[in-house]
Image (spheres, rainbow, N blue to C red):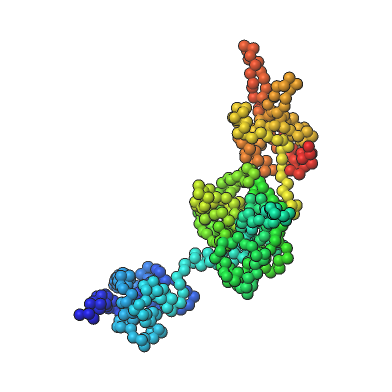
């Protein structure tokens, strides 16, 4: 009685599995198995051939044969269900391909599973079903393999940035470097240029860049400080990539562009072989729904990969100085604090954007992240490396904040000109700014309402309209000019007169505009 009771479930299962095939063969069906480069199970090969016959391919089976195949599939499904409810102690009996009780002499060559101890936990049995199969691979679809390959290829191009400020010691005159933050970046070229966000280094007096370098696995981190979260690195300084270690270098700022939130750093004394520039793609022609991958260092966890899709294109976010950044890419790939400056990749592993901001009520990822398009990054980075600064077209006027103009002066449309710099093309064209008359009355200046026919409602519209031109280009500027007219009853009224001027744009480094 004591022997029979624990064997009752086995008898029931043995009847259900009477066809004699091993559980392993029926468990690994074509729908769940991976197509491996190694020799597959004979059963899997046979079943693929049989299924192709079912679909009416070459050598299609007869109706009787198809019915037989459906019956076998139903039996296979029953086996899986029974296996899922069987206790671990029963599995050694069930996994013998001969249908009997597996013995200690059972050869693993004869059985894809072999003999498992009766105390084997179910999760280990499940792993054994896959790991001891002849293909010797864990299941992974082509998309998973592609993600792994992209990460391993791109990760050495992504760097970890620590920033520091200077603080004077309270008890001495010594100046100390104090860590203030961290972020991500990527290697741009073999000359050691590193690209990141401007806001990552905005408050910093100095920065250090950690690069993945080839090594024997021994720690090569210097200086000793790193803001990487404890446990993110191996005890010997190893990283998530085999045969790579982190080497930290001091970095200097080559140039910044606050209006686009882009900064370029440079590290010296780095062997060229250790610099792996990222492969740059294009942000032209992106479509909503495309796959996207982000690599960065969120919360101090270096080289973290997140995946998602392109959720939107043509978005607009504000730069650290309030200027609009247009054509921004929206993605639901998780972007968190620390990801700033890291690359956003397409499904081929090419960079399509640089992570810059998130929309989140909590401060962590809420599935709405933004990346500066790589076409913008390429243009700005090229200028910064060549000149150390960005030369942009300017109208040659200073303006009043649109919110203040609406609240204080009741201007509901357009941008009010505060001042027109003397000697600039704008002054020569006849544009007027705010001025005070001899009697103390303030006269409102021109109100810009359009550039080349494009309506101007706020500052962002003006900046965006001007950016599409080059210094020296002539643009049509349409303004509303306030004037006083007398009505029929003799009372004065302020009337707006629409006037269009042709104005030559100047460069942002023009000495005429900068002086005074």
Quarter-of-image position of residue 91: bottom left
Residue 64 located left or right of residue 334 = left
Q: Residue 497, relative to residue 19: is it above or below?
A: above
Q: Residue at x 54, y 65 (%)?
A: 231
In terms of depth relative to the viewer, which is nearer, 257 or 52? Answer: 257
Q: Quadrant of the C terminus?
A: top right
| x and y, in percent, of residue 160 in the image | 62, 60
Q: Tell me what residue is drawn at x 63 percent, y 14 percent.
A: 491
Q: Residue at x 66, y 61 (%)?
A: 209
Residue 37 seen in the figure: yes
Compared with 86, 485 (above or below) is: above
Going by the image, does 495 lie left or right of 18?
A: right
Report x, y in % for residue 187: 66, 61
Q: Residue furthest front?
A: 171
Residue 440 is left or right of residue 5, and the answer is right
Q: Nearer the viewer, residue 225 or 283?
A: 225
Tally of marks: 0
Quadrant assignment, res 97: bottom left
Q: Position of residue 335 (x, y in %)?
A: 54, 54
Instruction: Look at the image and tell me in which quarter the N terminus lies.
Output: bottom left
């Amino acid at each position: 009685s004591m022997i029979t009771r624990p064997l009752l479930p086995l008898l029931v299962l043995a009847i259900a599995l009477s066809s004699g095939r091993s559980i392993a063969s029926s468990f690994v069906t074509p729908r769940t198995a991976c197509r491996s480069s190694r020799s597959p199970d004979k059963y899997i090969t046979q079943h693929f051939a049989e299924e192709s016959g079912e679909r009416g391919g070459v050598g299609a089976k007869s109706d009787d044969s198809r019915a037989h195949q459906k019956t076998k599939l139903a039996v296979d499904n029953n086996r899986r269900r029974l296996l899922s409810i069987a206790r671990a102690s029963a599995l050694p009996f069930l996994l013998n391909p001969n249908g009997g009780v597996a013995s200690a002499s059972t050869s693993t060559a004869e059985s894809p599973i072999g003999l498992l101890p009766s105390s084997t936990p179910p999760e280990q049995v499940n792993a054994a079903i896959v790991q001891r199969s002849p293909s010797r691979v864990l299941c992974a679809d082509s998309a998973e393999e592609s993600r792994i390959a992209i990460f391993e290829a791109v990760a050495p191009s992504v760097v970890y940035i620590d920033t520091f400020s200077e603080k004077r010691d309270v008890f001495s005159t010594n100046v100390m470097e104090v860590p203030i933050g961290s972020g991500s970046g990527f290697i741009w070229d073999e000359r050691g240029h590193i690209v990141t966000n401007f806001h990552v280094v905005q408050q910093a007096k100095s920065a250090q860049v950690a690069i993945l370098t080839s090594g024997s696995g021994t720690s090569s981190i210097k200086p000793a400080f790193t803001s990487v979260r404890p446990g993110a690195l191996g005890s010997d300084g190893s990283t998530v990539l085999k045969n790579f270690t982190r080497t930290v270098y001091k970095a200097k700022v080559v140039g910044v562009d606050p209006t686009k939130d882009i900064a370029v750093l440079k590290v010296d004394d780095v062997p060229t072989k250790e610099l792996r520039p990222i492969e740059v793609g294009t942000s032209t022609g992106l479509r909503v729904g495309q796959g996207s991958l982000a690599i960065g260092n969120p919360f101090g966890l270096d080289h973290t990969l997140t995946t998602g899709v392109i959720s939107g294109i043509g978005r607009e976010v504000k730069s650290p100085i309030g200027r609009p950044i247009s054509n921004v890419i929206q993605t639901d790939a998780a972007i968190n604090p620390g990801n700033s400056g890291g690359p956003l990749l397409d499904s081929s592993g090419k960079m399509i954007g640089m992570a810059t901001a998130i929309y989140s009520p909590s401060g962590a990822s809420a599935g709405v992240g933004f990346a500066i398009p790589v076409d913008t990054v390429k243009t700005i980075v090229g200028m910064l490396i060549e000149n150390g600064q960005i030369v942009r077209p300017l109208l040659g006027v200073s303006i009043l904040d649109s919110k203040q103009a609406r609240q204080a002066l009741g201007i509901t449309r357009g941008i009010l000109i505060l001042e027109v710099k003397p000697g600039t093309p704008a002054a020569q064209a006849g544009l007027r700014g705010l001025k005070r008359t001899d009697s103390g009355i303030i006269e409102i200046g021109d109100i810009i309402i359009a550039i080349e026919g494009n309506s101007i409602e706020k500052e962002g519209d003006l900046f965006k309209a001007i950016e599409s031109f080059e210094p020296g280009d002539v643009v049509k500027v349409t303004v509303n000019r306030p004037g006083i007219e007398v009505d029929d009853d003799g009372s004065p009224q302020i009337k707006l007169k629409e006037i269009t001027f042709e104005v030559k744009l100047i460069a942002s480094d023009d000495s005429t505009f900068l002086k005074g």
